[in-house]
Image: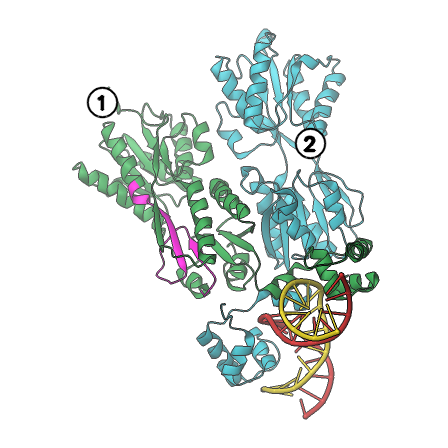
Chain colours: A green, B cyan, C red, D yellow
Amino acid sequence: MIEMTTIKDVAKLAGVSVSTASYALNGKGNVKPETKMKVLEAAKQLNYQKNGLAMDLKKSKTKTIALILSDLSGPYYSELIKGVQEVTMANGYDLIACSSIGGKDSTAIKFLTEKRVDGVIILAHNISDEVIMASSRDGFPIIVLDRFLEDQHIISVLVNNTQGAYQATKYLIEQGHRDIAFISGPSNSVDSINRMKGYQQALEEYDIAYQSKWTFTGNFTREGGYHATKLLIMQGDLPTAVFYANDEMALGGYQAFEEMGIKIPDDISVMGFDDIQIAQYLNPPLTTVKQPKYEAGTLAAHLLFQAFDNQEINRRYDLSTDLVIRGSVAKPQNLI
Amino acid sequence: MIEMTTIKDVAKLAGVSVSTASYALNGKGNVKPETKMKVLEAAKQLNYQKNGLAMDLKKSKTKTIALILSDLSGPYYSELIKGVQEVTMANGYDLIACSSIGGKDSTAIKFLTEKRVDGVIILAHNISDEVIMASSRDGFPIIVLDRFLEDQHIISVLVNNTQGAYQATKYLIEQGHRDIAFISGPSNSVDSINRMKGYQQALEEYDIAYQSKWTFTGNFTREGGYHATKLLIMQGDLPTAVFYANDEMALGGYQAFEEMGIKIPDDISVMGFDDIQIAQYLNPPLTTVKQPKYEAGTLAAHLLFQAFDNQEINRRYDLSTDLVIRGSVAKPQNLI
DNA sequence: CTGTTAGCGCCTTCAT
DNA sequence: ATGAAGGCGCTAACAG
């Protein structure tokens, strides 16, 4: 067994009591400079490192918050993390990120249910409503970024997907498109459903019939977007524009179109959703809907601190999206 | 103050002792199914959530490891994280990621020095050697991914930057290039220095004189690459190829060349380093040197577990890079 | 200014 | 099968 050196050891070597050692180490209380020196000296000599767990346990406070993501390695969260990080740090708190991969045994669950942090921000579709609500408790604020939950201690920060998709589709229509395909995400995704809704709303508003033959499922992945696009092409009747429910699927679309010698935006226009970093580097640069991820991050973190502070806050916040016009959408051929 | 419900409360409500409650909750020991029921029932009724900190303190073991990154929001770590995550999970451990932004007060320091995790993997240039070595202690393995440290408990997993840069430069030379510029990273970066070394080695091997007029500093950022490229162009004498010490700077280079109407690869060839995700989507796709980040991640995590297990392991591992040939390098004009 | 002491919440031997 | 009790390492009254 490995012998840990504790504050007790330090105290003994310094010839003082534990409390004095604690005071000296933490720079609190009134410790004679001389004794303080002795303690610090002893600590160094023993290579003493405090046990943060014991401290947190004693204080019933961790001063850290957890950001729970469905997949730590996704490039998608960059802006969100930055937003959260900035305000967390500004408040003197620590931030840790963990993943919800692994279901019941995931690290996420551990931090959600074992009082290891003072609050959490969740953007993880693979954690069920039930699990989140079961973790809700007094003094443990939870911010969710992808759904609304009817619970006292859970606050939602949402981006208005329906509005964003509406906006995007409307833009396509105003460019002259009438035949617009929609590649959706997984059918159980609230985000995907809402984007579809916005798409349909715009269609309806312009008296364009919704056609199910132009709706495919792409599962929010690049692969999925690729296959959906292939299907769309093989079907024979090509639309003049396709709206991918996220940028990753649009990436797959780019590839499929290129393989078939279909030029963007000359032969077909494409619209994405999310504005991931890569979007601007594509050829042509992808026109898409930007989600205010950074703002969502800062807002979420702010709300957490207000909750710590027992301030009165709303339980739901809606953020709006922005259309980012780049080069992947053009007027359809027949209008030129 | 908020009243936490503890195992004591559960025990009381269930009419059993604390130890029995603990056994029942953890499914250990021999508890009569009936009493177990009672305990579980009481726990649910009180919405009991165990305190993981207390447990870890008691067990002197956290079963979690920390991945310390210089910037959580960087898109750069994706593959690395995936590698670490997979083996961590496979071993039944938890993984948390934290950032070293903030120096002394960063979350990274907290996890490095306060016994909150059982081991750490570090890829964070902004943490000094001294800090890392000061955290070294018995039973606390540390894996560093960007330097070699002379310390009993610190293991290095490195990628061979010199070899990678050598390989890249050699390829350029073999394509017929003789005038090859090099855009370096920050001068204090070991990675950058080694890449420069590889570049010079290849030059030397082919009897090409190293010219300082073709070396600029780009600081490893896109902006830096952009400015360095502008400087290179303004200088009047254009090389036939430029080797950026990382892909991000190459991104800036693409922009600068485009602004000046210089075509890649027709007018100039460009080589990157890292193979970040965006590289393949650029126009033309970037030829670059791929770092085995995923492999580094899995290896690092494996080593951690071997260290937990007190197995004999080396203190240093070197991984090699791969040249990824895409479309940004061509034979120079004068050879066509 | 310094020492004594009582927990923070949990697990786990040791009795019973 | 269950209960009593010690302690993980630390902080913060409280008492000198």
User: In the drawing, does residue B60 fall left or right of residue B28?
Assistant: right
Image quadrant containing the C terminus of chain A: top left
Respond whether the residues carrying marks 2 and 1 are from the same subunit.
Answer: no
List the residue tagged with mark 2.
B191
**Taking B53 as reference, is A229 above or below it?**
above
At 74% from the left and 15% from the top, the residue drawn is B206
Please state which amino acid type lies under the numbered disc 2.
Answer: Asp
Image quadrant containing the N terminus of chain A: bottom right
Q: Between A204 and D16, which is closer to the camera in this rendering?
A: D16
A156 magenta-colored:
yes
User: In the drawing, does residue C5 fall left or right of residue B234?
Assistant: right
Task: Judge the density around disc 1: few (<14), some (14-19), many (≥20) Cα neighbours within 10 Å.
Answer: few
Q: Where residue A183 sits in the image (x, y, percent)?
A: 33, 40
Tell me, yes or no, if residue B324 can be seen here.
no
Please state which amino acid type lies under the numbered disc 1.
Answer: Asn
Circle 2 SS class: helix
Which of the 4 image quadrants contains residue A150? bottom left
Q: Between B16 and B157, which is closer to the camera in this rendering?
A: B16
Q: Spatial distance from mark 2 to mark 1, Cα to Cα?
A: 54 Å
Q: Where residue A97 sits in the image (x, y, percent)?
A: 54, 50
Q: Between B154 and B288, which is closer to the camera in this rendering?
A: B154
List the residue tagged with mark 1.
A334
**What segment carries the magenta color?**
A137-163
